[in-house]
Amino acid sequence: MSPIRSKQESKQKTSKGGTLPSVSVVICTYNPDNFLNLKDVIDSLIQQSHKVDEIIVVVDGEQMLGDKICSKYNRRKEVKVIVTREGMGVTRARNIGIRAATGDIIAFTDDDALTDKRWIARLLATYQITNAPAVGGKILPIWLSAEPEHLPEELYWLVGVTHAGFAEEKVTEVRDAFGPNMSFKRQVFEAVGYFNERLGFDAHRTSYIQGEEPEFGLRVKNKLGKGVIYDPEAIVYHKVSPSKLKLGNLIKRSFYQGYTKALIQKLFPLAEPLYTERLYLKFLILNSIPRRAKNIFSGPNRFNEAKQVSVLLLCVGAVGIGFIYGNCKLGVSARGNANVI
């Protein structure tokens, strides 16, 4: 099935409030074993209360998986499949999806997510109310094993879920949205460009650098004067596998997040790019950690609280080590006139 690359005028949907923009949703996938999860998210998009005009599935190098999706949805004209060469990586795959999309709004979700039935309707309503260039929403977990006792809500960002301290529970501006639940007006990509492919997960999945979302959010804000709007009622559910919850994986991701923050700071030295991280750290120091420490001695679940505080401190420490390492490495690269990314 070939991608539709035409840039013809998008069809408009009529509502009581006038016309609404057309919507394309991009899903990137690579694992043939993930077909059932992929089917779940495609079905959730087909069942949206506001019709999705295009569902573009970008398959990284797995022709058999692409053929399987085409076969399953051969009667759904809105489902379009692009099979790329192997090893493209998720960020490049997203950019391929953007170029293929024809919608006025281009939204993104993951191949192991489920979208709330009113997800698209909420995104569009927020665009209408705020005239934002980009809108994201809340990501809630679906634990594929028992709910983890060791993982505090403050660290849910490590597993692709909206964490405690991310934003107020209202429609508000944020620096960036998370990959499973973000959307942009088409004009944003025309004005700002595409996601930085050197800041995403390594194409061979051996590196956990993940800075394309905050870097793009900063570019949007700097270029257009307005940033991403967060709507907590635009909800996506993200399936979290047991492997993502292992302590070693959490610490590794924390380290790479710290390293990523050093990259972002290097790219935007005058834009206060880590303001979000400073607010989050302030929230931890003044609110979260003292409350949890108190609960260790007086709360009803003292043992679990102690585990969560320990994991929280370990992961925050790993972020700090990654940030220091990144700054040292980037400093050496800069002195040697090397590419810092």
Image (tube, helix red, strand yellow):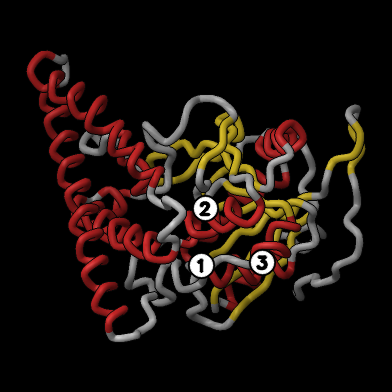
The amino acid marked with disc number 1 is: Val
**C-beta proximity under 8 Å, tags 1 and 2:** yes
Relative to residue 161, is residue 207 drawn left or right? Answer: left
- Local packing at callout 1 (Cα closer than 10 Å; few below 14, some 14-19, many 20+) is many
- How many angstroms separate mark 3 from mark 1 (CA)? 10 Å
The amino acid marked with disc number 2 is: Gly
Residue 183 drawn above or below residue 233: below
Chain-order first, disc 3 or disc 2: 3
- Local packing at callout 3 (Cα closer than 10 Å; few below 14, some 14-19, many 20+) is many
- How many angstroms separate mark 3 from mark 2 (CA)? 14 Å
- How many angstroms separate mark 1 from mark 2 (CA)? 10 Å
Q: Name the residue rendered at 85%, 70% in the picture.
A: 6
Q: Secondary structure at mark 2?
A: loop
- Identify the residue under disc 2: 179
- Identify the residue under disc 1: 90
Q: Position of residue 137 (x, y in %)?
A: 56, 38
Chain-order first, disc 1 or disc 2: 1
The disc placed on residue 97 is 3
